[in-house]
Image (cartoon, rainbow, N blue to C red):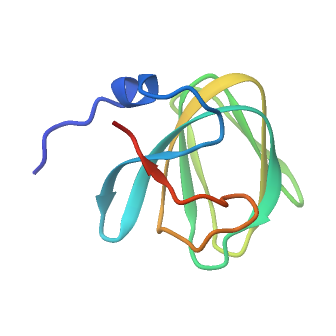
Amino acid sequence: MNDKIDLAEKLASFEGHWQPRVVAQYNGNDIMVAKVQGEFVWHKHDETDDCFLVLAGQLTIQLRDRDVHLGRASSSWCRRGSSTGRSRRKRSTSCSSSRPARPTPATPRPRRRAE
């Protein structure tokens, strides 16, 4: 077992929104933290599910047929192939897990490691 990961410390190591940082990996999956605020483009991951855990604030995951509202310490996932958008008017932080995917319009840059 590795040492613990201080998610608050990882989040404090960067400023940008919608730029997930990899903090750990397991079984081929990335564990990422991100700061989110405002709208995020609609996109789809054909090869992976996405799991979200809100650490602070609130996050709305927009699906084609409904919105999923998450508050602090709540979680949800989007199945592979689902089209999603995300929205947050005020700043929130989240942790997510997914298999690394090929870049899409929503994720044009490789995922960065948090310091």
Residue found at x 68% / y 22%: 91
Left or right of 99, for residue 16: right
- Indicate whether 57 appears above or below 110: above
Does residue 83 show up? no
- Residue 77: quarter of image: bottom right
**Residue placed farthest to the front in the image?**
109
Q: Is residue 4 above or below residue 97?
A: above
Residue 19 showing in the rendered view:
yes
Q: Position of residue 37 (x, y in %)?
A: 73, 29
Residue at x 65%, y 41% (from the top left corner): 18
Q: Is residue 115 left or right of residue 2?
A: right
Give the position of the C terminus as an image quadrant: top left
Q: Residue at x 32, y 58 (%)?
A: 25
| Residue 41 vertical position relative to residue 91 in the rendered view, above or below | below
The single residue placed furthest to the right in the displayed view is 65
Instruction: Give the camera-side residue of 82 and 115.
Output: 115
> Residue at the location (56% across, 30% down)?
93
Q: Residue lying farthest bottom? A: 47
Q: How many marks?
A: 0
Residue 98 locus on image (x, y percent): 49, 62
Relative side of 71 to 34, left or right: right
Residue 84 drawn at (x, y percent) = 77, 58
